[in-house]
Amino acid sequence: DFYSSMGSKVTIVEFQDPLLTNEDAEISSILEKSFKKRGIQFFVSTGVESALIENSQVVLNLLDRNTAKKEKLSFDKVIVGIGISPN
């Protein structure tokens, strides 16, 4: 949300569904609606098959785990966050 508010186009790729797997489904739904309202694109139940550099762009090849649909997206920068560790 920070990067979006600074004017960057933000895309979230989440392997699980919903976005917040450890929270109540209603909370996750509210977050998804908020992201959509802010123009944040997100993919749930989606894995990254590969990440490549092509013409100074990061190219991600995505696979929707539910439909087996593949998608190729290009980005200037990618931030990777893996896992969560409670305090």
Image (cartoon, rainbow, N blue to C red):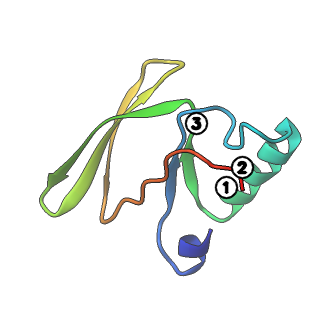
- Residue located farthest toward the left when viewing the structure as drawn: 55
**Inter-mark Cα distance, 1 to 3:** 13 Å
Figure quadrant of residue 36:
bottom right
SS at badge 1: helix
Establish if 76 lies above or below 6.
above
**Viewport quadrant of the N terminus:** bottom right
Which amino acid does the dot numbered 3 rest on? Answer: Val
Q: Which of the labelled discs sits on residue 36, or is there none?
A: 1
**Inter-mark Cα distance, 2 to 1:** 6 Å
Residue at coordinates 56% horizontally, 47% vertically from top-left? 42
Of circles 2 and 1, which is in front? Answer: 2
Reading the chain from its start, which is encountered first: label 1 or label 3? 1
> Which residue position is annotated with label 2?
32
Q: Does the CB distance between marks 2 and 1 fall below 8 Å? A: yes
**Inter-mark Cα distance, 2 to 3:** 10 Å
> Which residue position is annotated with label 3?
44
Establish if 13 lies above or below 7.
above
Which amino acid does the dot numbered 2 rest on? Answer: Glu
Reading the chain from its start, which is encountered first: label 2 or label 3? 2
